[in-house]
Amino acid sequence: MSSTVTSLDERTKEYGREIFARLNRQGPVLFTRAWVEDKLMGLGMHDPALKVQLFRFVDTLPYLKEPKEVARHLREYLNEAKDELPWWVRLGTKLIPDRGILGQGLAFASQKGAEQMARKFIAGSNVQEAVAAVHQMRTRRLAFTIDLLGEATITEVEADHVQKQYLDLLAGLTREVNDWPEEPTIDRDDRGPIPRVNVSVKLSALFSQFDPIDPAGTSRAVCRRLRPILSLAKQTGAFVNFDMEQHSFKDVTLQIFRDILTEPEFRDWPHVGIAIQAYLTDTEADLQALLAWARDVRKCPVWIRLVKGAYWDYETVVAAQNHWPVPVFTKKWQSDANFEKLTEFLLANVEWLVPAFGSHNIRSISHALAVAEKLGVPPRRYEFQMLYGMADPIKEAIQSLGHRVRIYTPYGQLLPGMAYLVRRLLENSSNDSFLRQGFAEGLAEELLLLDPNAHAAPPSHAAPTNHTEPMSHTEHAGTQNGHLPPARGAHAPRSPFANEPLTDFSVAASRTAMSAALDQVRKELGRTYPIVIDNKPQPVGAVLARENPSRKSEVLGKVGMATVDQANRAVASCLAAFDGWRDTPLAERTGLLRRLAEQFRKRRFELSAWIVLETGKPWRESDADVAEAIDFCEYYAIEMEKLGAPQARDVPGEDNRYFYEPRGVAVVIAPWNFPLAILAGMATAALVAGNTVVLKPAEQSGIIGAKLMECLQAAGAPPGVVNFLPGDGDVIGPPLVQHPDVALIAFTGSLKVALLINEQASKTPGGQNFVKKVIAEMGGKNAVIVDSDADLDEAVKGVVDSAFGYGGQKCSAGSRAIVLDGIYDQFLNRLVEATKSLAVKAADDPGCSLGPVIDAEARDRILKFIEAGKRESRLAHQTDLGALAEQGYFVPPTIFADVPEAAGVAQEEIFGPVLSVIRAKDLDDALRIANGTKYALTGGCYSRSPSHLEKVKRKFRVGNLYINRKCTGALVDRQPFGGFKLSGIGSKAGGPDYLLQFVLPRTITENQMRRGFAPETAPGE
């Protein structure tokens, strides 16, 4: 280590010791409110199980309107972890009152207690209270930046309201604060006056459809609401800081920041800044780019609020769920070390990037002081920022050294502010918390001031690695040495299968690749796709022209339409190839699937582009279709390797083998709504089991079916093992189903067709010496229950996504929302506004929230249902399509309210963007309604009551039940998919039982005795 680095570290520690020496560690005066709050906080927060349950209770509390609901939730949360709670809590749980004066007293005390805790971390609920809080801070020579708390912005009405709140806040604060006497320590830097009013803006709150998949559209919408805010701030002499949110929003946030501040009105305005998160691995590159932009393009400095980061748990969980690279440093010390590295970068470029260091970590603060001193940066040029209601002794110590301290000051209503409150409580109680370790637990100063890079080496001393503070606005929260804490309960054994990662469209390269694929595919329009038998294209007779449902004038190509004779020849080809394919070694059959998966990966964006154009799926949905097709290939290969090993049940003198063999010729009849995934899934299951396959795609997705056949041939499918047979289902469907050489039919589609197939297949015509196997997935009328304590931000978005994702054209779509009476009106109002805010566009537009339906027949059928719904119930919303109605096959997103449970729109599968909202008296009533259809495919429930969720799990009778998330989007292996009643015949696709439907079990017993002699066997055989 160089002497320069050593001396910098020593100077850092000297500053740290000086700050520690200046800390007021006396704490609150005995028996004051602050003392009681600290004691109660300490009592609960040091027990992990109690802490988690209390936080869940606090998060839910604002939604609970009745005393008995308050008591029930508190009891349920505590009972859920009763085996891990202290004895005194277990005893107290039994005494929680339900009703009467005691119940009312508990509810009142709980609500007041939560409100009091909120007041500790939230400055006020309106502008007047915010002004009062700011005034009090200024009397303590503390600067401020105001942060507006609020519900998630899921409607454009809410986005307009947020803009108005920012404008009102700026007008109200500047009117008051700018007339107050100057306080030079916080109102000036080394160059002169600086703005007194400082406001932090969250860009995603300004647009309900904020999405990095469409940075241009997102930027336009955000800037439309942001410009008046910036104009007013500039006019009134205020400062605006752009908050940074999750990693997926980072690039579009930076783009908006650069674009709008390069506009002539704001180009020379220096009183703007942006938060930058040190826990992200790519932050250094972002700062380099910001420096070049500020210096060479804008030619005017900006402020940088350097924080550790607020979403560490979220980022790691999202990355793990999607199998994406983790965007954050995975160890706490790495984030701390990067913070110091970026501190040095900012202080070295202070003329263009003016730093505000957001941290409570005395080591991080001391390092900034030491670097600034070394570089000769004036102390007033930069500042430190800390959170309202936290670390007051540290604030005072930094002030006493002559530095400006600015307080990050949230204000807003209690209900939307509760999530912020829970994050603050987590920070105060985290095992990694600098505040907890430095104050409550009194960890040694030298350990707290240790260089974070010291943890890079193997531990050779007693210093712990988790010595720094939590993150939140500034630090990690709720982690263990930078890793997620283990979940309670046992984990299932890891499978060798891993889902194919979805494309991350927040990455510019992914968006570019998708756009390029769409351009390339459009150059290939107009081709004809023939029937393929024995790997040979057949002469083209009748064809079906395929058009783009988003733009019906755009013809994509033509697909050959098979005759009955060609259908018979396809079956004959499969039958001739069957014996050879059955006897092909398992390794070759699984190899075919894995090579097919590689073909899909190689052509991923091309295939996605075809799905966008031929079936009207938006970008993400199309990409997920290809990913699911890859998953089926990989998963079924693994599962067949498990099934392919014969089971031995030997006894002395006798060998027994149990094994599986394929059924024969399989006809795969697939729908258009998952044009690649379902077709590939059923086909690969049949193929890997040793069956030969007649591949019959839906008429509406014949080109994508042809692309699958191309991939199968490229992967090495032998002649006759799979034959591509597009055609009219009414013409070739019955001959295929009734053919005496067809052993199995795998079908996904409508109930009517499935039942007809099942009926036809049950017959045994002459020459057929087996009973056909039918596997059918037949759809659903799926319900999402919204409990009275549901988180409406999540519930509204989840119902909208479930009902209108891909225009409701999924068998899993949530077409009924069953809402408990206590929250019905509030839910319905937000649901309608959220639906109004959806971007109905052509599917190839990256900003598309909802595209067309598949064709004119589907459009007309759905519109008839809508007209019937208007007679049965109340029309709550129907989107005006404008010119889209003529451009393509668009159907307006439609919501019916107060729907009778027996109404047609509440009972029949519509397969379109139509949602029925039904009122329920209570949870039992909701479950009765939910189960009251002929289907049992998917369902969902939004609730925060453990007892209600347990009841839902027991009594909501569906194949796939989703709790507190949307009811669509099942993944192979993770959520095997399928239902019962009239939703399905057979086991779940993408699950461990699925392949058993494609095979027949056999047992072979061999007597090994020879004239009283049996071969010797090794011990244990």
Image (cartoon, rainbow, N blue to C red):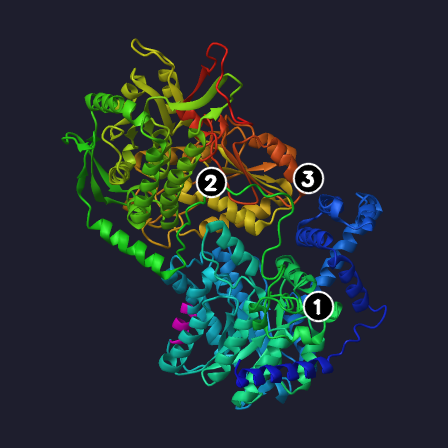
Contact between marks 3 and 2 (CB within 8 A): the answer is no
467 and 425: which is toward the camera: 467
Other residues around mark 1 within 10 Å, as few (<14) / some (14–19) / many (≥20): many
> Does residue 44 appear in this view?
yes
Q: Quadrant of residue 492?
A: top right
Query: What distance separates the C-alpha of mark 2 from that of mark 1?
Result: 43 Å
Among the two numbered marks 2 and 1 on one chain, the one whose residue lies closer to the N terminus? 1
Q: Is residue 567 left or right of residue 510?
A: left
- Magenta includes 261? yes
| Amino acid type, residue under disc 2 in the picture | Ala
- In the current view of this chain or complex, which residue is farthest to the right? 31
> Does residue 182 appear in this view?
no
Residue matched to label 3: 947
Q: Is residue 79 above or below residue 340?
A: above
Q: Is residue 403 above or below residue 933?
A: below
Query: What distance separates the C-alpha of mark 1 from that of mark 3?
Result: 36 Å
Q: Which stretch did the figure color magenta?
A: 255-262
Contact between marks 2 and 1 (CB within 8 A): the answer is no
Query: What distance separates the C-alpha of mark 3 from that of mark 2?
Result: 25 Å
| Amino acid type, residue under disc 3 in the picture | Ser
Residue matched to label 2: 970
Q: Is residue 680 above or below residue 623?
A: above
Q: Is residue 831 above or below residue 478?
A: above
The secondary element bearing badge 2 is classed as loop
Among the two numbered marks 3 and 2 on one chain, the one whose residue lies closer to the N terminus? 3
Q: Is residue 456 left or right of residue 41?
A: left
25 and 632: which is toward the camera: 632
In percent of width and height, residue 84 lies at 74, 48
527 and 929: which is toward the camera: 527
Residue 437, label in figure? 1
Other residues around mark 2 within 10 Å, as few (<14) / some (14–19) / many (≥20): some
